[in-house]
Image (cartoon, helix red, strand yellow):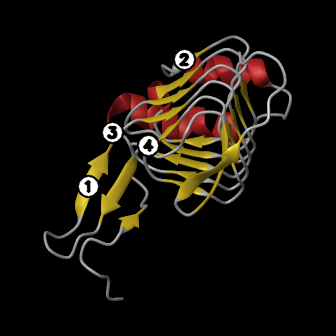
Amino acid sequence: MMRAPGADTFELVAPPPPGGLRGVLWRCIGSPLVCHSFHNWYGFRRRLLGLFGAHLDPTARIRPGLRIDRPWNLTMARKASIGDACTLWAEAPIALGERSVVSQYSILSTWAVDADASVGPTRRVEPVEIGADAWVATECLVGAGSRVPPGVVVGARSTVRADGLEPWTVASGDPARSRAPRPWKGPRP
C-alpha cells in the first residue's frame, strides 16, 4: 500500500513479552488468574495485580478478562474502572485518574511502530494517561503517548493518537477529535 510522505502512518503491534522472573511468573500464574477470576472478585484482582507491582486504589475496579503484559506499570486512582476483556500493553506507565472508566474490549497501548518510508519503521514507547472523570467507550484504541484530558468522553470505536483533545468534551473518530462540549450540571469535580 502506497502512502503519501508525511501521512499519519500509525501502526499498533503487540510488544514482546516481559523477561525475567517477574515476567515469567506473571505470564504463567498472575495473568491467567486475573483473566479467569469470577466477575465479582474485584478485591482478588486488585490484590493479585498489587502483588505484581500495580498501584491501585482500594476502590478501583477491574473486571474479568483483563489482559495486561506488565502490571507493574499500571496506576489506578480512586473509583477508576477497567471493563471486561480490555487489553493493556504497558511497556511504559498507564495511569487512570479518579472516576475514569475504560469500557470493555478497549486497548491501551504504550507501544507502537511508526512506519515512515523515508527512515523505515521506528519503535515508540510512551506512557498513556486517562484523566479524572474521563470515559473511554467500548472498543476504543488509545495509542502510545496519548493523553485523554479530564472529563472527556471518547466515543465507541474511536482511536486516540495524541494530545489533541480538549477537556470536558465529547470526542470521536479516527483519530479522535473533540466534537462538542460535554454537558454537566453543577460545579465540575
Q: Give amino acid for label 2.
A: Leu
* Cβ atoms under marks 4 and 1 closer than 8 Å: no
Residue at image mark 1: 123
Mark 1: give few (<14), some (14-19) or many (20+) Cα within 10 Å: few
Mark 4: give few (<14), some (14-19) or many (20+) Cα within 10 Å: few
Horizontal side, residue 5 vs residue 46: left or right: left
Mark 3: give few (<14), some (14-19) or many (20+) Cα within 10 Å: few
* Residue positioned 32% across, 60% down in the render: 113
Mark sitting earlier along the chain (4/2): 2
As measured in the structure, the alpha-carbon distance from the residue carrying label 3 to the one carrying label 2 is 17 Å
Mark sitting earlier along the chain (1/3): 3
Q: Give amino acid for label 4.
A: Asp
Question: Residue 97: horizontal and vertical position, in percent?
Answer: 59, 23
Question: Residue 75: horizontal and vertical position, in percent?
Answer: 53, 22
Residue 19 badge: 3
Mark sitting earlier along the chain (4/1): 1
Q: Is residue 115 above or below residue 155?
A: below
Q: Give amino acid for label 1.
A: Arg
As measured in the structure, the alpha-carbon distance from the residue carrying label 1 to the one carrying label 3 is 18 Å
